[in-house]
Image (spheres, coloured by chain):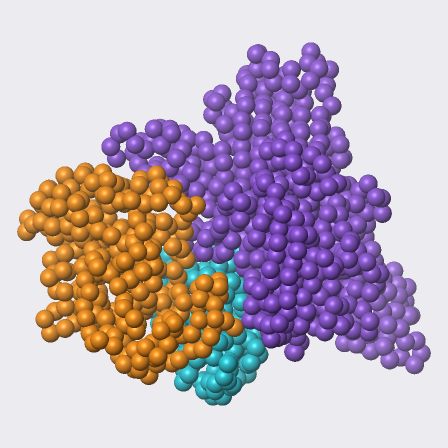
Chain colours: A cyan, B orange, C purple
Amino acid sequence: MNVEILNCIVNGRSVEVAIDPRESLADTLRERLGLTSVKKGCEVGECGACTVLVDGQAIDSCIYLSLWAQGKKILTVEGLQDDNGELSNIQKAFVEEAAVQCGFCTPGIIMSAVEIVGSGKSYTREELRKLISGHLCRCTGYQNILNAVERAVNEAHKFVGK
Amino acid sequence: MYDIGNIYSAKSVPDAISALQADPTALVIAGGTDVLIKIREGKYAGRNLVSIHELRQELEGVSLSSDGDVEIGPLTTFRGCTYSEVIRATVPVLGQAADTAGGPQLRAAGTLGGNLCNGITSADTASTQMALGAILRVQGPGGVREIPIDEWYQGVGKVALGPAELLVKIIIPKSHYEGWTGHYIKYAMRNAMDIATLGVSCLVKLSPDKQTVSDLRLAFGVAGPVPFRCTQAEQDMAGLSVAEAARQIGPAARKEVNPRDSWRASRAFRLQLAQELSQRAFLEAARKGGAAL
Amino acid sequence: MEVGKRLSRVDAPDKVTGRAKYTGDLVPRPHLVAKVLHSTIANGRVKAIRTGKAQAIPGVVKIVTCFDVPDIQFPTPGHPWSVEKAHQDVSDRRLLTDRVRFYGDDIAAVVAEDEISAARALGAIEVDYEEYPVVTDPEVSMTAGGESIHAECPDNVLASMDVRTPMPESDFKTVEEVLDCPSYHQFRGHYQTQQVQHCHIESALSYAYMESGRIVVVSSTQIPHIVRRVIGQALGIPWGDVRVIKPYIGGGFGNKQDVLYEPLNAYLSKAVGGRCVKLELTREEVFQCTRSRHAISFDVAAAVDGDGNLMARSVRALSNQGAYASHGHAIVANAVTAFRQLYQDQLGCHAQARTVYTNLPSPGAMRGYGIPQSNFALESMMEDIARAFDLDPYEFRLQNLMPPGYVDPFNGITCHSTALRECMAKGAQFIGWKALREKYQNQTGPVRRGVGMAVFSYKTGVWPISLETAAARMVLNQDGSVQLQLGATEIGQGGDTVFTQMAAESIGFPADRVHIVSTQDTDTAPFDTGAYASRQTYVTGMAIKDTGALFKSKLLDYAAELLERGAGELDVRNGEIVDAGTGQELLKLHDLAQEAFYSFRHSVHIAAECTHQCKDNTFAFGCCFAEVEVDIPLGRVTVLRVVNVHDSGRLINPQLAEAQVHGGMSMGLGYALSEEMKFDEKGRLLNGNLLDYKLPTAMDHPELTALFVESDDPTGPFGNKALGEPPAIPVAPAVRNAILQATGVAVNTLPLSPQRLVEEFTKAGLIGGKEG
C-alpha cells in the first residue's frame, strides 16, 4: 500500500502528514498527530467517542477515511483552549456541571457541543437530547451532559447580547 | 486501519465509471458509513474501492428542475436532505425520514444514494422514496438510463445497478408530490442510533373538502425482504372517507406485509406494528393535508 | 470542612482537554499487536490447530495455541486472595484452552506487526474440533448428563446453598409449613432476569513489555493489585516479578473487576522476548468474551397475615454461570441474602441458590453484584402481594422493612443507620405518589399511565464474607502540600476527588493542597484491592482517615520542635499550624516543609502510611419512584418522570453523588426496558455490538432526579456508606410496577421490551379482539 500525503488544517494549523490510505481519520489523528482525545469505543460509528469536526460538522472519525480530509479543517478538543490556555466556555461548563465521569466519551461530546453552540441557535431540552444522541455514555445518564451543553448554549447567547 | 485492497479517488463521474470498468471487483464508497463497517466486519475485507466521496460538485445537493421535479444528488447527506429548503418546501416527509437515521454524526456523513444502493430493507429513506415513486437516474458505460424505484430492488442487498453503473440522480416528479402530504414513522428499540424494527411511510391526497381520500401511498421497510408498497391497500383506501380509511388501513396493510421472524423481532410483533403504525402514519399524513381529526 | 463540599472533580480539567491518558493513549511505539482466536463452537474440544498458512502471512511474528501454553489453571475474579484454601476462588481458566466451553473461547493468539496482519492471520488458522451438544439453560445443564463442562464439577453445579433463618417458637417447624398454612394469604411467583453487559465505552485493553527481567502490564482495570497477583498465578512466576500500571480508565462497572486478558498479554510479551505487545479487544469481543451480569431465575413464595405482615418467605434462585466461574456463586449468594435482609419475616425465610455452568459467555461482577436481580424479584413480588391481597404497596413495604439495629443472623451485618423511611417519604412526595396512584387507577384506552416504586438495601464492602483492607500513603512536598497515594482506583466514579476531600479533611488542609496520584503502579502504590462493592469511600476512606491523623501528628511533632511547644497545644487548620486553643496561626506549613526538607539541624521527610483492615459493614438504602406512559398497541413504555432517593450516609461530595446516581438510574432504565444479551441455540451472541445491544441514548431518558436523605453512619469514616452501585438497583422493579398499575399486566421477565409487552398485552386481551 502506498503512502499518501495529507494536507489539511488541524486545530488551526496547517498539517502535512504521510498517511496510509487505509487509515481512518481517527487513526491519523491519534497515531500520527498524537491527538489522543479522539477515542475509539466501537469503530463502527455507534458510540460517538471519536467525534471531531470536519469543516464545522461533527462526524465519527472512525468511519471517515483520512484521504477525504484533504484540504479540510479538522477540529478536536486539543484545539479548544485559547492561546493563554484558558478553557473554552463549553469545557468550563462540563467541569462545573460535573458532566465528566470516566471521561472517555467527554471529548467527543464536547465536539458535538462545539457545533451546537456554534450554530448560534437556541434549543429546547428535547432538541438538545437529539443533537447529542450520537454519543453513548454509560456513566452520566446524560443528565449533567445536557445541563452542561444547555449552560454553554445559554452563555453563548449572553455574549451575543453584548 | 481498514483492510482495504487499494482505493482510487475518482475525479469525476466518468472517471469513476472507467475505474469501475477497469476493476470490476471494486466497490463504490461514498459516505463510508456502510462500506467501511462491512470491511471491518470482514464481509468486504481486502476489497478494492472507488471513492466518489469527493464528487460533491457533481453529485451533492437538492434542486428543483424547471418543470418542478425535485432532483436530489445521491451524495446528499441525510442531514443535507433534512435541512434542504427545496425538500422542506416540496417533500418534507423525505426530510423527516432522513432525520431518523442513526444519530447526528451519521446523518452528516451517510448519503441518500448509499441508503438506496446498499439495497437494505431497513433504509430509513427508502420507504418514503418508494411511496413517492422516485425515479433513479444511473450512468454507466452505456450512458444514462432511468429506473423507477419500483424496479430498483432485486432482492436482499441487490439493486438494479449494472456493471460500472453509478446512481447519479434521484428524481421526485412534481406530480408525485404536488397535492400530497406524508408522514414517516420509524419504529425502533431506541429513539436514536438504531435500525428500524419497522418503518412505514404514508402519503395521502385528500379531496378538496378534506373529507375523502382521493389517493394514497403506503410503503414499508422491514416488512419484507426489501422496501415495498402495499398496492392493494392503496387501491382499497382510495375513495373512502378519511375516518373509514383510518379504520381499514391497518388490517389492510397487515394482510399485505410479509415480515420475517428474526431474533431482532418476531413476525407477529412486526405484523402488529404494521397494522397499528399504518393507521397512525395515515392519520398524521391526513392531518398535515388538512383533514379535521 | 472539605468533606461535604461540591468540589469540582480533580480530574475534570484533564478530561475535558483530552490530556487525560488512558491505556490506549500510552502504548509506546513501536509495538506489536496481539489478537486472540476465538472458538466457533460453544462446546467441544480442539483436536488440532494448523498455523502454517497464518505463519506465512507477512507481518506475523508469533502464533501460540492452546497446546503451547503452560498447564496452569487460575482464578479471575477481583476478590482478595485467601490464605485458606477453602476460601480461594475457583481456578478454572487457562491462558488458552483446548477444551472449548463457550462460543468465543480463547484457543490461540497471534502477535503481529500490525492489526491487519494479525486479523488476516486469525482468518488463516485452521482448527479441527470435536463438538459436544450445546447447553445454554442451567436447568438442562444440571440434569442433562453428557460431558461435564469442567471435569472438576461433574454435575455442572458450581455451588449451591440452602439457608434457613432461625425460627421463633411457634406451631410451625419449617418455613414451608407456614407457606402452606391456609390461615395466611398464600403467594407464589416466578421472576426471571436477563444477561446484560456493562458497556464501558473504553474497550478492555492492555499492553505488556519486559523491563529489568520483570513483566510490566499497563491495563484498563479496576483492580491493579489483584491483576498483579493473578498474572503471577497464571504464568507461574513470583508475584513480585509482575508490575501492573493502571492509568485513567473509560469505565468498568465490574467488568474490569475481573482479570480479563492481562495474563495472556503478559505471556505473549514474554513469548516475543519482552517486546511491547498491545492486546485490545474489539467491541464485539468485549461483548462475547468478557464478563456480564448473570441471568437469574427466582421462584418465590410468601405467607402474609391479614394485617399485612410477612410471616414467611422462600426463594429458590438459579444462576446461569456460563462457561467459567469468575465471581461464581458469590453473586447469587449475595442476591438471596438481600432477600432476607430488606424485609423481615415474622417466622422465617428459606433461601436456596444454585450456580450452574452452561455454554454461554461467563457473567461476573456487574454494578450491584446480584442485587439488581434479586431486587427485581423481591420488589415485583412485594407489589404483586399487595395487589393480590388489596394492600397499599407503600404501606405494605413500610410495615415489613428492616428495622434499625437489625443484625443479620448469619453474617452479623448490622443496620447501624437507616433513613430508608425518610427516603420513601421524600420520593413519594416528589412524584406525588398518593395523587397519582389514585388518578391512574382504572384507566382505559390504548395509552395509559401508571406510577410504581421499589426500595432496596445494600451492604458496604465485602466484610465479613471476604477480607477488607486498604492502605494510604501521604508524603509532604517541599511547599507544604501533600501527595496522596492510594491503591484504590478512580474508575470514573469520582474516587480521586472524594479521596482528596477526605485527606484534606483528616489533615486539616484545604483540598487544593492535596495532590492525588491518580495512576496506580503496583511497584509504588500502597496495597488496596480496588474499586468494587461500593467499598472505597468506606474502607479506603478509613485508611485515609487513619493516615491523615498520623500524618498530621507528624507535622505537629515537627512543628512542636520548631516552635518549642508541646505538640498537643498545636493543630493544623486550613493548611497552617495554629494554636489549638486560640486558633492563632503560628507557622506556615510552607516554612515547616522547607525546614523539614532542608534543615541542617534536623532533616526529615515527613510521610505517613497506614493500613486499615475494616471489620465492619453497614447498610445503604434507597428507593425509586417512576411514572410511565404505556402505548399498549406498540408495546412502548415512556418513562415520564423518575426519581431515586438514597441514604448513603453523609455525602462526601453532593454534586458527584448526584452524578453517580444519574448514571446508575440510566443503567437501571436500560436494564428495565431494553438491554439484553441474546443468544442462538448454538450459544452464539446475536447482538454483541453497540447497534444491536440497546444501551439507552440521550433520547431514551427522561430527566433524572437524584435526591438524598443523609443519615450519619457511626461506622463510616465520615458518616458515609455505599453509593457506587446502589443507584442501578431499584429502577427496573419501579418501572415494572408502574407498568403494572397502568395496564394491570404483571410482566415478570426482564427486559420489558416492546415485543415482550405486546405479547403480554395480547395474552391479557389488551391487544387484538376489540378494535383500537
Point out the residue furthest to the left here.
B208
For the point 57% across and 67% down, the residue is C119
Front residue of C92 and B14? B14
Q: Is residue C493 left or right of residue C631?
A: right
Q: Is residue C22 among the parts visible in the rendering?
A: no
For the point 82% across and 41% down, the residue is C86
Q: Is residue A125 left or right of residue B215?
A: right
The image shows a total of numbered marks equal to 0
For the point 73% across and 71% down, the residue is C272
Q: Is residue C632 among the parts visible in the rendering?
A: yes
Q: x and y percent of residue C7 in the render? A: 61, 62
Q: x and y percent of residue C444 in the render? A: 31, 31
Front residue of C638 and C1? C638
Q: x and y percent of residue C557 in the render? A: 88, 66
Q: Is residue C51 left or right of residue C732?
A: right
Q: Is residue C383 above or below residue B213?
A: above
Q: Is residue B260 above or below residue C473?
A: above
Q: Is residue B170 above or below residue C69?
A: below
Name the image quarter holding residue C24.
bottom right
Quadrant the C terminus of chain A occupies: bottom left
For the point 83% across and 63% down, the residue is C240
Q: x and y percent of residue C471 in the render? A: 79, 57
